[in-house]
Image (cartoon, rainbow, N blue to C red):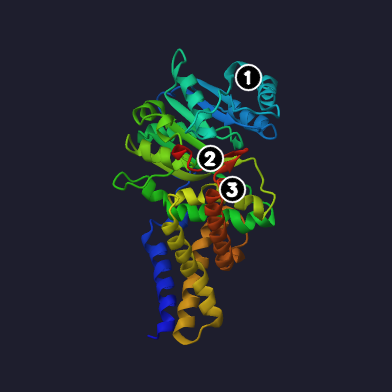
Amino acid sequence: MTLGALPGLLALAIWLYLLLGRGGFWRTRQRDDRDRPPAPARWPAVMAVVPARDEAEVIARSVGSLLRQDYPGAFRVVLVDDGSTDGTAAAARAAAESLGAGHRLDILPGAPLPRGWTGKLWAMQQGVRHAGAAGEPPEYLLLTDADIGHAPDNLRALVARAEQGGCALVSLMAELSCATRAERFLIPAFVFFFQMLYPFAWVARRDRALAAAAGGCMLARRAALEAAGGIASIRAEIIDDCALARRLKAQGPIWLGLTRRAVSLRPYQGVAEIGRMVSRSAYAQLGYSPLLLAGTLAGMVLTYLVPPALALSGTGLARLLGLAAWALMALAFQPMLRFYRVSPLWGPALPVIGAAYALFTLHSALQVWRGRGGQWKGRAQAMAGRA
């Protein structure tokens, strides 16, 4: 073998491992519409906690979808208004009243943000505290974002799965908007890369320490959350959903899957907006380590860019290895493309998409170094716990 073929061999080995040895992440088999659990003998009480900051554009649809749940047990919603200036609370209240469900919605004005907390987690903390102070505290907390819409049977399905498996946490990766060209270019890959980092099948296994969740829709057992140290135990985390999953997996089983029952109500206007979404947490995922950043970028070049480079400009064995790795890459992407109902022709474009995510990761680090990391709703939250 020539030295020039070595990068191709390494890239091919990477993709063979990803397809055969990474928990089958690419198959998208962990979905909430498969192996649906039976209804439990008793439907426990649930309270939804919705942190919201300047979400007037979507909050009526989000809160309305929660209040329209066909859940047989006791269910209430608490909205924590985190200093909104756009009438978020009024829009939520109007939506509840229009459904005749105003009595099931509590709206809390958020307290000032303490040092060492991210804004979202501080709002969640207030909502969870409110739930615990109820006359009969709920057994479960539905922790959901203000821009998530829920199908009427979503809560019923979440609780049934949690009760059947004795789960401390059941989480759904909400279906993201994928209508524009920019969304089709980047959104399926976002979920694909997330599953690559956190194979959902491994998340559910008790014999593996790997834990993850999707913050848009998480059903947590309240007693398990308290035993894990509560929201305060993750108060400075940017990737708060996965941090919470790690805490809760120590308390009991967890489960994470894809869904169409929870959908994002927020469209992305272009590549730059999606890039900002990725950049908010990418460097935090690397523990703010320049060494890990350099290794990650080098790994992404080898994994995504070397195969097409060899396939298009290499010769002999190097070209064959590049073509094989590129083909496996495109094949691995197909189930996620089908889930998002986009053309399979995006599969061969994964190298270009991977290059874009490498740039987003580098931008994330630059933002942190400039003191603007984790930017969200006017707050730079990266490394909040180290301030």
In the figure, residue 342 lies in which quadrant? bottom right
Mark 2 or 3 closer to N-term? 3
**Up-down: is 15 above or below 154?**
below
Q: Nearer the viewer, mark 2 or mark 3?
A: 2
- Distance from label 2 to label 3 (Cα)? 13 Å
Residue pointed to by mark 1: 101
Q: Nearer the viewer, residue 90 or 280?
A: 280
Q: Secondary structure at mark 2?
A: loop
**Up-down: is 260 above or below 5?**
above
Task: Tell me, for residue 381, which label it has, or none.
Answer: 2
Residue pointed to by mark 3: 277
- Disc 2 marks a residue whose amino acid type is Gln
- Distance from label 1 to label 3 (Cα)? 33 Å
**Up-down: is 243 above or below 292?**
above
Q: Nearer the viewer, mark 2 or mark 1?
A: 2
- Disc 1 marks a residue whose amino acid type is Ala
Q: Quadrant of the N terminus?
A: bottom left
In the figure, residue 347 lies in which quadrant? bottom right
Count residues near mark 2 (Cα–Cα under 10 Å), then give few for <14, some for 14-19, many for 20+. many
